[in-house]
Image (cartoon, rainbow, N blue to C red):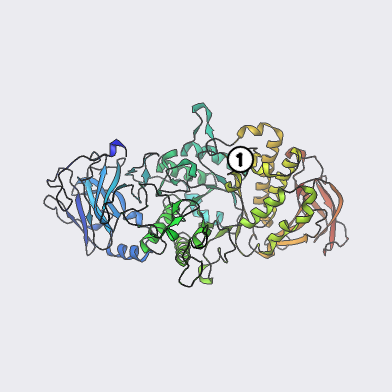
Amino acid sequence: MDQTNVGSETQETETGLPATPNQGATLVLGAVEGRLIISSPTPAPPEVPAMNLHLLLDTDIKLFQQGTHCRLQEKLGAHSATVKGVSGVQFAVWAPNAERVSVMGDFNQWDRKSHPLRSLGDCGIWAGFVPGARPGSCYKYFIKSRYEDYRAEKADPFAFRAELPPRSASIIWDLNYAWGDSVWMKERARHNALDAPISIYEVHAGSWMRVPEEGCRWLTYRELAVKLAAYCREMGFTHVEFLPLTEHPLHRSWGYQTTGYFAPTSRYGSPQDFMFLVDYLHQQGIGVLMDWVPSHFPTDGHGLARFDGTYLYEHADPRKGFHPEWTSAIFNYGRPEVSSFLLSSALFWLEQYHVDGLRVDGVASMLYLDYARKPGEWIPNHYGGHENLEAIEFLRRLNETIYREQPDVQTIAEESTSWSQVSRPTYTGGLGFGLKWDMGWMHDTLRYFKRNAAFRKYHHGELSFRMVYAFHENFVLPLSHDETVHGKGSLFGMMAGDEWQKYANLRLLFGYMYGMPGKKLLFMGDELAQWPEWNHESSIEWHVIQEPRHAGVQHWVKDLNHLYQSQPALHERDFSPDGFQWIDHSDADNSTLFFLRRGRQRDDFLLAAFNFTPVPRPNYRVGVPRGGYWKELLNSDAQFYGGSGQGNSGGVEADRLPWNYQPYSLRLTLPPLSASFFLS
């Protein structure tokens, strides 16, 4: 423990209150019939209306205990207040199994005893008003449990800001900010709609770009805002998705071990600085998504684990409460107060910080009781199955709450199994997410691209199989950070062939992704064709774009993004079979694929053509539904992108020769390892 947190010695009575009240003694709060009662070791001042403070009313407590309170941070935590002309802060914390709770901070020299809180009864909440505490002050709760000899100094689960790790105190903070993104907020339903072009740039804020002149430090939120917005606008990405920016103790966890569910990490600045980041991106026309982690939390001593000496937020039985793969605690989703905590956190980021959507991490680990467990290491549900019924109910409640309160956002599930109806409404039996990552497509496709081109004809189904299930869910096609870490190498490094073929294969991979139905996600650095896998301790390799072949891949991704946005056929019907039509997926010997993408308008369609071998295919006949001139919109083999320069001289005139069950046909040149797009 830091020496600054060592409490001073004060004589204590059997009740745990100071024997002699000092000048800064806590004004202790209680609720009676919706009114605020203030008491103190000194004579109590008159009653103050509850509206003057953020005290829980009877309705709040009822919702909290039902598991449906979705703005709990307005009631619990630390909130500036004035009582009878005295400025201070109201503190409130849920610790039902505590014998004593007090507030310690730099306003009382970290004294564990000088500012006790008072229990508000059976709801388990402790609360009090501390005169003289102010925004910017650091604090923790000192908790003495009823059970065992448990004493702990805990960060506030509802704190809006935390100290810069490795320090771990909470910081009293107000969230005032003058937003400038009103135009975006009025229109964000359109930007986030299922028929909109959504091309996501996945970013780890600490390693997207560093400042080498200053010891390679990471950018602040405000520095990141300007640089990232300019880059995304230039590259044509519609949304940024941040790896978790909730406070976390360990940088190398990338934010996935969350301790502050209401606090943006202080590594890059203040809460207002993060608001500026979101605000600026919105003003530049770029949506903001954030990874959010309700699947587990770390066991650090200052965090949620054994918060009041008992397993309060997590299950007591390690077969349900401990995650063996991530060595972290698992939330008790069946506990209503925990549900209220998580619902409030999710909605908080969407409302307070104007975030446009949450990508929910580790959904599969929540759904299955036997996830990452061996036989005998898990407990079946009361039907004898391995489904986590409490987590299923929570996820449905989460999505129902979010779409009821903020219908113009999206929730996105990282769900890696074949669980049915993840992105279907709860009233039809679904989980209620708006979108789901297509992990099957990602694994099948990357496995295919690792194969030597000479043997790809034997694995043609790894490309075509996806369309068997493509419209069962609202899918995002992810090429995410998970595929560029833990020894997997970079996307570029996964590509088969010699050096020229690796670049061509990477361009082909991106072209194939943008052609297929589904929203798009690309992890930072992959668009540069960087060689090494991602390292969170350094910047992505911006210097490589000085080399023409790397710059060519970057230009290709830029042009794909702009094509994707400009052509309704590529995004309007991402989740409807009417938006896709195979022309030919049967030519495994030549490893080619051809399909149409269709928009809402009857004659709005686009032809996508792919050659997955390094062998050029001249005079290759492909059926099309319409005659006339078909313009070659993009060709990944163009010299501008680093290709060999083969193609169709800008376009092809259709022949009145039926082919592939189509009334017309084109005679195309298919360049080696290429993706081409044609529009009539």
Badge 1 crowding class, 10 Å Cα cut-off, few under 14, some 14 to 19, many 20 or more, is many
In the picture, measured across the screen, residue 413 lies left or right of residue 177, that is right
Relative side of 290 to 635, left or right: left
Name the residue nearer the viewer: 96 or 671.
96
Residue at 33%, 42% (x, y): give it: 169
Quadrant (top left, top right, bottom left, bottom right) of the N terminus? top left
SS for callout 1: loop
Looking at the image, the residue that sits furthest to the top is 213
Q: Residue at x 82, y 63 (%)?
A: 662
Q: Amino acid at mark 1?
A: Glu
Q: Is residue 61 above or below residue 303?
A: below
Q: What number of labels is visible?
A: 1
Residue 259 location (% of width, % of height): 40, 48
Q: Position of residue 93 (x, y in %)?
A: 30, 54
For residue 121, which quarter of the picture?
Answer: bottom left
Residue 173 appears anywhere in the view: yes
Q: Give left or right: position of 292 versus 571.
A: left
Q: Residue furthest front?
A: 376
Front position in the image: 641 or 563: 641
Q: Place residue 608 in its image quadrant.
A: bottom right
Q: Is residue 666 above or below residue 254?
A: below
Tag 1 residue: 533
- Could you tell me residue 464's position as x and y percent? 73, 59
Left or right of 87 on screen, residue 626: right
Q: Which residue lies most toward the bottom here?
A: 383
Placement of the C terminus among the 4 image quadrants:
bottom right
Res 604 visible? no
Residue 97, position in %: x, y?
A: 28, 58
Residue closest to the eye, 397 or 538: 538
